[in-house]
Image (cartoon, rainbow, N blue to C red):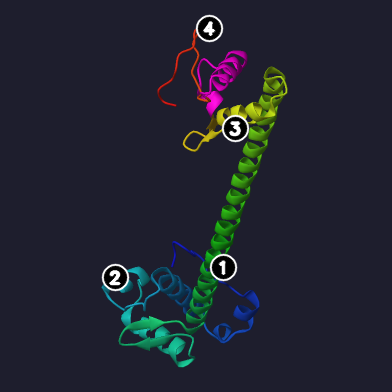
């Protein structure tokens, strides 16, 4: 008990108006020592050799003092040792308070955990929304840049954009972003050229010479 609560409540009014005031200073001094020993160990104080060495009092005098404290029910003597009723009550109150603190602590932790999870969910949603908005902006920009190059051929423009704007689910990047040598004008010219030959097949152009990409 001493490590968690090295002190106990001391009511000065109760002390000054209590039964203990009818006793001598020896009684009071012994009682305070007993309180300290009992609170320190939270176990009955045994009247063993160690106790007698600490008290340094004649056995007869000690027995008389303890007898008086016991008769007035200030202490309780049993085979287990000496206990003190008012400290037992304080211990019960302390344990009940610690239990309530633990209960409230668990509730608080649960609420914080729930709050943290909700914050994380909101953060992910914001990131997803920003990513979608970013993809849309880049897609719109790509379509606008490609549109004049198709000479109003909206069918070819649509198929071209649909192809190069497709998103890789593993990298979350669009196809044109993963093409190291992507050049809008060259890609459009290649797309139109293949379409005019009846081969609407995408190509990967590294120079002005067309080279078919077998991956497509």
Distance, label 4 to label 1, CA atoms, is 73 Å
On the rendered structure, is 128 left or right of 26?
A: right
Does 32 sit above or below residue 215?
below
The reply to whether the C-beta atoms of the residues labelled 2 and 4 are less than 8 Å apart is no
- Which residue corresponds to mark 4? 208
- 118 or 75: which is nearer to us? 118
Residue 50 has which mark? Answer: 2
Q: Residue furthest top?
A: 208
Residue 162 has which mark? Answer: 3
- 40 or 107: which is nearer to us? 107
| Residue 100 sits in quarter | bottom right
How far across and how far down the image is residue 8, in percent?
A: 53, 70
How far across and how far down the image is residue 175, in percent?
A: 53, 28
Which badge, 3 or 4, is on the more N-terminal residue? 3
How far across and how far down the image is residue 195, in percent?
A: 56, 22
The reply to whether the C-beta atoms of the residues labelled 3 and 4 are less than 8 Å apart is no
Give the residues drawn in magenta, as a range: 175-199
């Amino acid at each position: 008990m001493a490590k968690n609560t090295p002190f106990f409540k001391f009511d000065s009014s109760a002390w000054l108006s209590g039964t203990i005031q009818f006793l001598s200073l020896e009684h009071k001094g012994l009682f305070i020592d007993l309180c300290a020993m009992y609170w320190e160990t939270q176990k009955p104080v045994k009247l063993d050799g160690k106790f007698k060495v600490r008290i340094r009092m004649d056995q007869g005098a000690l027995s008389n003092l303890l007898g008086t404290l016991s008769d007035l029910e200030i202490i309780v003597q049993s085979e287990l040792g000496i206990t003190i009723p008012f400290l037992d009550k304080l211990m019960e109150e302390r344990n009940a308070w610690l239990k309530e603190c633990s209960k409230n602590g668990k509730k608080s932790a649960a609420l914080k955990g729930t709050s943290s999870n909700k914050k994380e969910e909101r953060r992910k949603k914001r990131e997803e929304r920003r990513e979608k908005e970013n993809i849309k902006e880049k897609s719109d920009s790509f379509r606008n840049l490609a549109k004049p190059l198709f000479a109003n051929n909206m069918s070819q423009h649509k198929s071209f954009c649909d192809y190069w704007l497709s998103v890789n689910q593993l990298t979350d990047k669009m196809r044109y972003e993963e093409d190291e040598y992507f050049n809008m004008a060259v890609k459009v010219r290649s797309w139109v050229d293949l379409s005019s030959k009846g081969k609407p097949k995408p190509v990967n152009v590294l120079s002005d010479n067309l080279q078919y990409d077998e991956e497509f």
